[in-house]
Structure formats: structure tokens, C-alpha cells
């Protein structure tokens, strides 16, 4: 159901399987629009939590966006345990206080 909604909202998005070695550990959905790279969804399997997988996943799009002079936008549910790690990667709130916090990263 969730993937269907993403496909409607982001019809040109790339759907990537995240792996550690040969083992799938999650997914990443990326969408490019104008000068923005949208991180539509990052899902890490519970067995890979707390091992730096989320931070490692963010570094790839950040390098790409920096090289292309794009900003990165993502929405993060404030109750998500990753909510503590994302600001450490240089993301900052984009607007207001909502259930989902809109975050962005700008290339240096």
C-alpha cells in the first residue's frame, strides 16, 4: 500500500535495495525534481539498526547532491528512532512543528 502511494506521488523515483555484503538490509527510494533530491523513503531492517547503516545510506545521496549542487529533502516521523541520527548528518528542519518533520540538506 505504501509503495503504491510512493509510485503515484513519485512516478520517476529510483527504488534501491540496501545491502551489507550480499545481505539485503533495507530499501531507499530516491526522486530527482529540479534542483532537489528527495529521499522519499529509507527503511532499514531491525537486525541492521544501531550499526551505522542509516548514516552510511545518507552519505551516498549527500555526495551525489553535493556534486550536482542539489539540496536534499526528506520527511521524518518525529517518533522514528532515526530522528536523533539525521541531524548529525547535517540535516536541519525545513519548516514548522508537525508529526512529520520536513528536513533538508544543502551542498556546502
Image: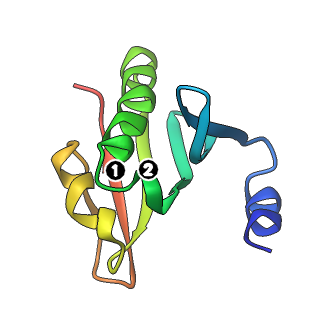
Residue farthest along the left direction in this orientation: 88
Q: How is the image coloured?
A: rainbow
Q: Are marks 1 and 2 in contact (CB under 8 Å)?
A: yes
Q: Residue at x 60, y 36 (%)?
A: 23
Above or below 37: residue 59: above
Q: Residue at x 52, y 38 (%)?
A: 37
**In the rendered view, does 81 fall on the left or right side of 25?**
left
Does dot 2 land on a helix, a strand or a loop? Answer: strand
**In the rendered view, does 70 fall on the left or right side of 82?**
right
Within 10 Å of disc 2 (Cα), the crowding (few <14, some 14-19, many 20+) is many
Q: Earlier in the sequence, mark 1 or mark 2?
A: 2
Within 10 Å of disc 1 (Cα), the crowding (few <14, some 14-19, many 20+) is many
**In the rendered view, does 56 fall on the left or right side of 28?**
left
Residue 97 in sight in this render: yes
Above or below 12: residue 45: below
User: On residue 104, which mark appears?
Assistant: 1
Does dot 1 land on a helix, a strand or a loop? Answer: strand
Q: Position of residue 6 (x, y in %)?
A: 73, 61
Above or below 70: residue 97: below
Q: Residue at x 40, y 22 (%)?
A: 69
- Of residue 104 and residue 79, the one placed in the foreground of this image is 79
Q: In what quadrant of the picture does the N terminus appear?
A: bottom right
Residue 50, picture quadrant: bottom left
Circle 2 sits on which residue? 73
Q: Position of residue 38 (x, y in %)?
A: 53, 46
Q: Residue at x 30, y 46 (%)?
A: 51
User: On residue 28, which mark appears?
Assistant: none
Amino acid at each position: 500500500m505504501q509503495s503504491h502511494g510512493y509510485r503515484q506521488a513519485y512516478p520517476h523515483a529510483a527504488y534501491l535495495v540496501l545491502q551489507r555484503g550480499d545481505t539485503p538490509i533495507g530499501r531507499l527510494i530516491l526522486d530527482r525534481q529540479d534542483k532537489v533530491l528527495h529521499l522519499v523513503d529509507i527503511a532499514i531492517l531491525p537486525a541492521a539498526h544501531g550499526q551505522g547503516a542509516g548514516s552510511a545510506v545518507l552519505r551516498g545521496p549527500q555526495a551525489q547532491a553535493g556534486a550536482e549542487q542539489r539540496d536534499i529533502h526528506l520527511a521524518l516521523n518525529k517518533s522514528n528512532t532515526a530522528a536523533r541520527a539525521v541531524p548529525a548528518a547535517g540535516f536541519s528542519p525545513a519548516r514548522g512543528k508537525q508529526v512529520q518533520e520536513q528536513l533538508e540538506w544543502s551542498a556546502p
